[in-house]
Amino acid sequence: MPLLTWILLFSLLGGVLSVLAAAVFLLFPEQLRARLLPHFVSFAIGALLGAAFLALLPHALEAPGVKDFHIVTGTVLLGVLGFFLLEKMVLWRHCHHSDCEVHAPEDDPDHAHSHDHGHNHAGHAVNHAAGTLILIGDGIHNLVDGVLIAAAFLTDIHLGIVTSLAVAAHEIPQEVGDFAVLLHSGFSRARALVYNILASLTTLVGATLAYYGLREAEAALPYILAIAASSFIYIAVADLIPGLHKRLEARATAQQIVLIVAGVLTIYFAHSTLH
């Protein structure tokens, strides 16, 4: 079998299989999902931060072509600011004259009602923006996974197979978190599954680019990793963590901390299988 066929086959398996494994969560009854969803969001925060700080950024900083760490960390900073602006644009698009705090006149007697309605509408837009950003970040991450799988196959077929399986195992806990974020953002189960599968297909794009131009892909790799890390950091810190502060009970806080740590540790142990 041609090497490119090996690469594309195992890139597809490594990307889509992890999504389908995580999609088991969608088979749960609706009431059970509603009870579990807040816990999955806490787990997602830990998984996103773990993936950013324990997997993506270390790989970016350790890349052979990186001579100045400040360029990589600067890329992360620009990525965070860029995703902030992207989310702003999503909010502006959902902001209408009759129900947006920005556009409602201060002397309008119905301003108080518009203000409250605008906040509800903006809150929905924020949640939906988080789902959009997680898909962008996941697509970038999967593209990089495709590059890594192709690089392993170009070294040795057996190494490529092992790497593909390790990537799939590493992706499953993160995909569970992604599903939690998408459902929390208002996506239906069907849309969450379809969009996650589409995002996973960027693994094929990364693998193909790496096969035909690995040297160029390696040069861009640390900065692609940095952008993916900035996406995960921004979503976890700006969109998900504030929602946890709505529950201030000691028991709920303890559960959140435990699940965040569990998410970080899951990514840590899953990622360690790649080394």
Image (spheres, rainbow, N blue to C red):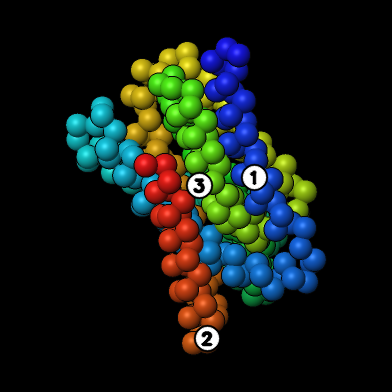
Location of mark 1 (residue): 19
Q: Nearer the viewer, residue 131 or 44?
A: 44
* Mark 2, other Cα within 10 Å: few <14 / some 14–19 / many ≥20: few
> The residue under label 1 is which amino acid type?
Val
- Relative to residue 163, is residue 29 depicted above or below? below
Left or right: where does residue 223 sit relative to residue 174?
left
Instruction: Kindly state the secondary structure of the residue where label 1 is placed.
Output: helix
Q: Which one is closest to the eye, mark 3 or mark 2?
A: 3
Count of number-bearing discs: 3
Dot placed on the residue nearer the N-terminal end, 1 or 3: 1
* Mark 1, other Cα within 10 Å: few <14 / some 14–19 / many ≥20: many
Q: Quadrant of residue 13?
A: top right
- In the rendering, at what x and y percent does residue 34 appear? 72, 70
Location of mark 2 (residue): 251
How far apart, in angstroms, are the residues tagged by discs 1 and 2?
32 Å
Query: For the point 19% across and 31% down, which residue is it?
Result: 67
Location of mark 3 (residue): 170
